[in-house]
Image: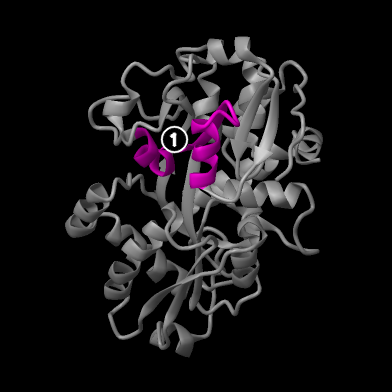
Amino acid sequence: MSSTKARHLRPGRLAALAAAALLPVSLAACGDDSGAGGAQAEGDPAACENYPSEDVTLLVPYSAGGGFDAWARLLAPFLEEELGGEAAVRVENQPGGGGMRAINTVYSAEPDGTTLVFTEPGYVAVNQILGNVEEGFDVTNLAYLGQTTADPQVFVVAADSDIETIEDLVAAGPVKHAGQDISPIETITYDAYGVEAEYILHEGTSDVVLAVRRGDSDVAVASLSSILPFMEAGEVKPILYLGTEEITPELVGYEQLQGVQTAAETGHPELADVLEQHRVLVTAPGTPDCIAEPLEEALMNTLENEEFLQLAEESDLRVVPASGEEAAEFVSNTVETFAEYEDVLEEAAG
């Protein structure tokens, strides 16, 4: 367990981040040729014709039981069927290095489409900016196959806390923030609202929620899909919602989020665009189009499959699909914009 003080960003830098995040970027920044984001145009004809000729490993960069694991295990059998059903798609949990161990495995894998990873590229981009990667690593070089969801972020406090709004949190400062790491989500959000925070780190979401419940910490932030079960159980309550989708009856978690402040309502609509969590499927750099494109097609077909959508709804998994090209653009934007905050992220990670 460790903690560090957050620092306030210079005025105007948040607005610059939001504007830059919305700029279109060339896919040349994400790979050498067109196709699935970061894929290569040509490949071995025999390998392409026979793909997949062996089992596909779908890596999860965290332990079993979390949101990434749930997504991967739901996707796997549908991907297997879409790819012809002759080769298995096997889920393997490979935690370590804050999620980077699995990313490094895929980054150094053969570009043959047999090693995939389901990840959140924003955190990978932060590790790259802070130098917590091997020499030569570039997240934009990965081959992006598509996005399954864009998960809103929710700031929560204990269910019996006197804090009801972001204004209450500011007034209560300095506050203790419980988390598994120090991410741009809380660092940038706290700067925007003027919250001074001390970060107290824990091993997992359950430990984070426990710290907030018993008063060891004042506040935490997590993706909606990860924190929703704890809100439904009455262990924590939301005080701020950061998401591009409005809080309507169609939104998973609507009952718990009714009346909760949003970024737009509190004067910072740009936060919703910049800080949502994107979950994407990627494979090794240099994967040829003749392999990457069938993988992307398999993913997109899965995300439109009625049976899959029903199972996702029953599991409270929100499906927000995007193509490999769109995912690659988002990653390139993320690296560019987060780089502007390198000094702030370094101090927070201290």
Q: Is residue 211 magenta?
A: yes
Q: Which image quarter holds the C terminus? A: top right
Tell me if 151 is positioned left or right of 121 in this view. left
* Foreground of the two, 138 or 166: 166
Tell me if 340 is positioned left or right of 93 in this view. right
Q: Residues within 10 Å of mark 1 (few under 14, many from 20)?
A: many
Q: What percent of the width, then of the height, locates residue 196?
A: 70, 20
The secondary structure making up most of the magenta span is: helix
* Residues rendered magenta in the picture: 205-231
Q: Residue at x 35, y 81 (%)?
A: 88
Q: Residue at x 29, y 45 (%)?
A: 316
Q: What type is the residue that disc 1 sits on?
A: Pro
Q: Is residue 187 above or below residue 44?
A: above
Tell me if 17 is positioned left or right of 143 in this view. right
Q: Is residue 316 magenta?
A: no
Report the residue marked by disc 1.
152
Q: What percent of the width, then of the height, locates residue 113?
A: 49, 76
Q: Is residue 98 above or below residue 103?
A: above
Q: What percent of the width, then of the height, locates residue 136?
A: 78, 63
* Foreground of the two, 6 or 10: 6
